[in-house]
Structure formats: C-alpha cells, structure tokens
Image (cartoon, rainbow, N blue to C red):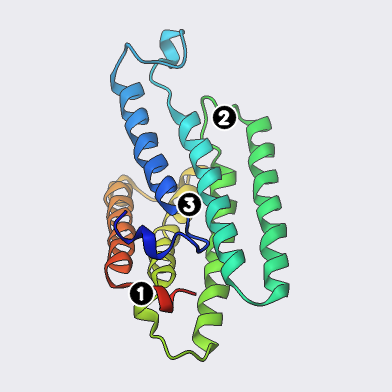
Amino acid sequence: MIKYRSYFDTPLKYFPMLIIYTFFTELLGVIIKYNNNFVFFSDGRYSWHNVIIYNIYQIVFFLFFFEVFRKVIKQHGIKKQIRYLSIFCLFTYIVNAIIYNPLHNQTTYGHIIGSFILLYILALYFREKHMEKTPYSLKHNLLFWIGSGLLVFYSIFPMISIIYLLNLNIGIGIQIYFRPLLLTSILLMYSLIIIGLLVGKRKAFR
C-alpha cells in the first residue's frame, strides 16, 4: 500500500483491491470449511463446500491480469489476441459451469485453460521486454517481478490439475509432494511480487 502511490495511474491501479479480495477469499474459505455456523448450504452433506468462491475468484484473477498485460504490451496484434483469449477463457468457464455444478465442483477445465492462456501472454510479454530498448533495467520493473511470480505458480498449477483431472496413476509416493509443491510455488510467487514492490521504480514500469 505504501508503494501504491507510484502505480495508481498504471494498469496495476486495481492491484491492491485484488490482493484484498484474495485475502478475504481465503479467509471466507477457511471459515466456511471449519465453522459450522457459517455455511452456504443448508444440506449438511454440503455444509463445508466453499469451492464456488474460489471458482469466482479465479475468473476475476485471470481476467484482471489478462487486461493488465493487454494494456502494457505495445503490439496491436497481440492486444487483439489477448482480448479474444479473454473471451475464450470466460466462455470455457461458462461451459465448465454448465457441465459441472460450480457450487460443488471446481471449474477445473476453466482453470487449466486460463492458466495456459496466462502463460502464453506472459511469454509474449517477456519476449517483448527482452527485445525492447530502454535505459531502465528490468529488475526495477514491478510488472516484470509480478509476471515472474505468476510464471512460477502457473507453470505448476495446470500440470497438477491435469493429473488429477485425468486420474493418472502416478503413485501415492509422488502425489504426496503435490501439496508442498503448490504451497512452495505460492510462496515463491508472492515473494517475487514483494521483491518487485520493494525494488520497483515508477520510471521502469512498462
């Protein structure tokens, strides 16, 4: 929040709101799962179900960053690609919600498609930054650090989602590492974002 004044007029102007939304989503998810007095469903079989808030959150998360990178990337053709990919991602979530009730099931197909779209956009962004001639170092570019953090997590998240979706028999010995791997990738993602906020400079933002 201290650093926000440096970025309030950039595509990241709503980033603090996303962080706050993330915090309250996680908080609400824990309350629903472990507090019987706070539930979405009267049926006791579903009293602990909180997946809907994460399904909604993930859509907002993807669309937010799709729009951020669409505004930052300079090539007009890529901007159009991102706009179409955003619509396709939203369509995927709608179809997923029609096939599997999003109140009780993760919109896994949407998560996977959204993850790959984000990785594609990140690749385009990093490629453009690599080819760009500028007097400012990338290490002072906040969006570079945020993109790096997203790259860490979303390089792992869809792979694990696909394994669970396809119910691949890879052995319990390997599956027990999935949760620590995801938690580690989350830690690295937020660590990189924090580093970017600490070392980032407004003039280097692009």
Q: Residues within 10 Å of mark 1 (few under 14, many from 20)?
A: some
Q: Is residue 142 left or right of residue 2?
A: right
Q: Where 23 sits versus 99, above or below?
A: below
Q: In the rendering, which numbered label is found on residue 14? A: 3
The percent position of residue 62, horizontal first and vertical second, equals 54, 51
- Is 11 positioned to the left or the right of 77 in the image? left
- The image shows residue 172, relative to residue 143, as above or below, that is above
Label 2: state its secondary structure: loop
Task: Name the residue: 39% across, 58% down.
Answer: 153
* Pointer 3 or 1: first along the chain: 3
Q: Residue 125, how many percent across, how many down?
A: 54, 74
At label 2, which amino acid type do we have?
Pro
Indicate the amino acid at tag 1.
Lys
Q: Residue at x 42, y 61 (%)?
A: 150
Judged left or right of residue 38, residue 102 is right
Residue on which the image places disc 2:
102
Q: Which residue is mark 1?
A: 201
Tell me which residue sits at (27%, 55%) in the image.
Answer: 187
* Distance from Cα at disc 1 to Cα at disc 2: 41 Å
Q: Are marks 3 and 1 in contact (CB under 8 Å)?
A: no
Measure the C-alpha gap from mark 2 to mark 3.
26 Å
Query: Residue 202, percent across and down?
Result: 40, 73
Residue 155 x/y as whole percent: 44, 62
